[in-house]
Amino acid sequence: MGKKGIILLGVLAGIGAIGYGMYIWFNKQIEGAMNYCYKFSKINIISLKKDRIAFTLNVKVKQNSDIRLTLTGYEFDVLINGRKIIKLSEDREIEILPKAVSNFTTTIDFNPSNMFNIADLISLVYYGTMERDKFIIEIVGKLNVKANFLEIKDLPMNIKMTLAEIMAPANETDEKNYQCKIY
């Protein structure tokens, strides 16, 4: 093998090492993005009437990767004390920052008279006002996320928190109540 052959071999080995390094880095970033955490952080009551309950729910998502992600849509069921109250589905782009906590808000609006009898409704109002640790809000469903040229569809999401946990004062760095998914 001549001098040119050795140089060519060295260049190819260098290119191969760079490509392998990029592959390892990208896989590490995808792994970090798939190991995300989330929690409900705030609830704002819009309406609390016998024929309409409406509130906004803020969800914090903490992702552990160095790449910027975009939530492209979601579809999930909202449950209160184990009873499905509404199915939410939306296609919109929400930016999820790298190695940070990002927020998105959704509005939940339903007619409780269609799904609760009067005793259930009284119980719901009682737990929501007097015993917030027994008022459980849960979101079960899936997210669609993209990062640059890669799109992940149907990423599972399941958050379950009591109203007391949601309304407890917390700051941005508070780790309490984050629920994490590890893949």
Image: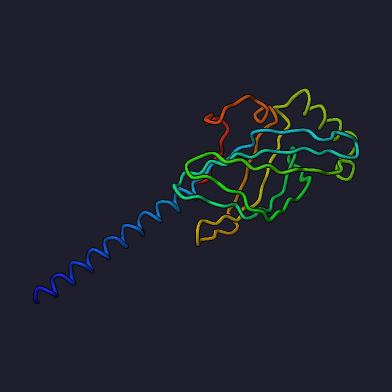
> Residue 111 is drawn in which quadrant?
top right
In this orientation, which residue lies closer to the viewer: 124 or 37? 37
Quick check: 170 above or below 25? Answer: above
In this orientation, which residue lies closer to the viewer: 11 or 33? 11
Quick check: 39 above or below 30? Answer: above
> Residue 46 is drawn in which quadrant?
top right
Identify which residue is drawn at 67% across, 54% down. Answer: 92
Residue 18: where, in percent of width, then height? 29, 60
Q: Locate the N terminus by quadrant.
A: bottom left
In this orientation, which residue lies closer to the viewer: 32 or 7? 7
Identify which residue is drawn at 35% across, 58% down. Answer: 22
Identify which residue is drawn at 78% across, 47% down. Answer: 86
Give the colouring mode of the picture: rainbow
Number of dots carrying numbers:
0
Residue 134: where, in percent of width, then height? 72, 29
Horizontal relation, residue 61 to residue 123: left or right: left
Identify which residue is drawn at 52% across, 30% down. Answer: 173
Residue 23: where, in percent of width, then height? 36, 59
Residue extending farthest to the left is 2
Quick check: 123 above or below 138? Answer: above
Horizontal relation, residue 100 to residue 45: left or right: left
Residue extending farthest to the bottom is 1
Quick check: 126 above or below 21? Answer: above
